[in-house]
Image (cartoon, helix red, strand yellow):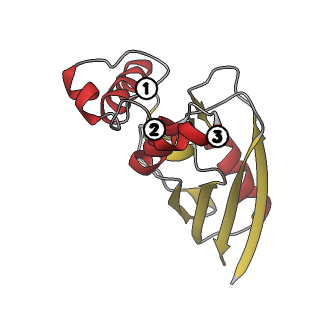
Amino acid sequence: MAAHTVYRTFNTDRRREFVRITADVAGAVEESGIREGMALVCAMHITAGVWINDDEPGILEDTLEWLDKLAPPSWKEPANDVAAELSPDPGDFRHHRSGGEDNGDAHWKNLLVHHQVVVPITDGRLDLGPWQAIFYAEFDGGRDKRLVIKVLGE
C-alpha cells in the first residue's frame, strides 16, 4: 500500500465559513498516483471540521443557522427559545470564564459536523456522487489552521 500526505493552511476572512476543497483533495489524489483506495481529509483544529454536501448557498446558510440553534454562539443573541435553552448555564461556556475566549460554540459545531471524512478513490479519481462537494468548515476563523489530506491505496 502507498501513502501520500498533503497539508493545507486556511485563514478565512470571516469567523465562520465553508471553503470548497474538492479540487484540493482531487489534486492530492492525482499527485499520489493511487488508483484504488481512499482519501482521509482531516481538520487539524478543534474549532473546524470537514464535511461532504451539496455546494448550494442555501444549504450552507441553512446549515449555519441550524448549527447556531444547536450550538448557540455566546457572542450573539440566541436564535430562538430552543437555542437559549441549549446554551450553557448560566448563559456562557465554562471554557470562556478562565481563558477570555468566546469560541465555545465552535467546539460544539466541530462535534456536530465532525473533523474528518473518508472519500473512496476509484480509477484514480474521487468517487463522489453527482452533487457532492468536500468542504472545510471554519467555525472560529481569523487565524491559520491546518488540514491534512492522507491518500492511501494502490
Q: Which mark is residue 93?
A: 2
Q: Which mark is residue 142?
A: none
Q: Label 2 sits on what residue type?
A: Phe
Of the numbered discs 1 and 2, the one sitting upstream in the chain is 1
**Local crowd at mark 2 within 10 Å, few (<14), some, or many (≥20)?**
some
Q: Secondary structure at mark 1?
A: helix
**Local crowd at mark 1 within 10 Å, few (<14), some, or many (≥20)?**
some
Q: Label 3 sits on what residue type?
A: Gly
Q: Quadrant of the N terminus?
A: bottom right
Between the residue at mark 1 and the residue at mark 2, the CA separation in whole angstroms equals: 25 Å
Residue 5 position within the rendered picture, expressed as x and y whole percent measured from the top left: 77, 64
Residue 72 position within the rendered picture, expressed as x and y whole percent measured from the top left: 38, 29
Name above or below for residue 75 compared with residue 19.
above
Residue 36 position within the rendered picture, expressed as x and y whole percent measured from the top left: 59, 72
Query: In the figure, residue 124 lies in which quadrant?
Result: bottom right
Q: Which mark is residue 99?
A: 3
Q: Is residue 52 visible?
A: no
Residue 154 position within the rendered picture, expressed as x and y whole percent measured from the top left: 66, 78
**Image point (70%, 27%), residue name:** 12
Between the residue at mark 2 and the residue at mark 3, the CA separation in whole angstroms equals: 11 Å
